[in-house]
Amino acid sequence: MNRTLIAAGRTGLTLLLVLFSLAGRASEPAPDFTLTSNQGENLRLEDYRGQVVMLNFWASWCGPCRQEMPLMDEIYQNYKDLGFTVLAVNVDADSADANRFLEAVPVSYPVLYDTESRVSELYEVDAMPTTVMIDRDGNARYLHRGYQPGYEDHYAEQVRELVRE
């Protein structure tokens, strides 16, 4: 991804984050990216246009991620047939750390490796985990920083809202 695209995305995302902090909800195009998945293929966010996407940034050292990921897998299983997916972006510098984590906490949705932190920088991720809900038109609609028990109820509610649109 070139620096111009990253800079343009960062400007839009900064506005998006301001809107999120003011209203808790916004609609701004989610910056596109391509990353390698745990299945060895390159996945591009744009290829999921038409689906609701839960974009989740996580790290192997993140305790709340360990709690959250199986709950997100439940949501994924419940709504995947309605045009919903989870893309879990791991931010560890070494993907082997992520793979060890996934042995202990397996999930059925795609896991992507952001070993150089390009995508997490593009999305200005400043907390682990960070989750962005993206609608079928590719617009970021909800942002969640961190995780506490009960957030999964908000995720499911937002997924239901977005798949109905």
Image (cartoon, rainbow, N blue to C red):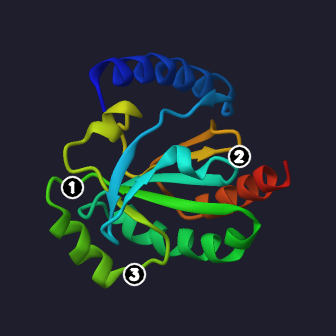
Q: Taking 1 as reference, is 159 above or below it?
A: below
Question: Which residue occupies the foreground of this view, 46 or 23?
Answer: 46
- Residue 49: image x %, image y %? 63, 47
- 11 to the left or right of 23: left
Q: Say whether disc 1 or disc 3 marks the residue closer to the N-terminus.
A: 1
Q: Taking 80 as reference, is 26 above or below it?
A: above
Q: CA distance from mark 1 to mark 2?
A: 28 Å
Q: CA distance from mark 1 to mark 3?
A: 17 Å
Are there few (<14), some (14-19), or many (20+) residues within 10 Å of tag 3? few
- 2 to the left or right of 48: left
Residue at image position (30%, 60%) is 62
Task: Identify the residue position indicated by label 3 in the image.
Answer: 106
Q: CA distance from mark 3 to mark 2?
A: 27 Å
Q: Quadrant of residue 122?
A: top left
Task: Identify the residue position indicated by label 2 in the image.
Answer: 136
Circle nearer the viewer, 1 or 2: 2
Q: Which mark is residue 92?
A: 1
- Residue 17: image x %, image y %? 52, 26
Question: Which residue occupies the foreground of this view, 55 or 58?
Answer: 55
The answer to whether residue 131 shows anywhere in this view is no
- Residue 47: image x %, image y %? 55, 50
Residue at image position (68%, 55%) is 154
- Pointer 1 and pointer 2: residues touching (CB < 8 Å)? no
For badge 2, the amino acid type reads Arg
Q: Say whether disc 1 or disc 2 marks the residue closer to the N-terminus.
A: 1
Q: Secondary structure at mark 2?
A: loop
Q: Say whether disc 3 or disc 2 marks the residue closer to the N-terminus.
A: 3
Question: Which residue occupies the foreground of this view, 115 or 50?
Answer: 50
- 21 to the left or right of 87: right
Q: Secondary structure at mark 1?
A: loop
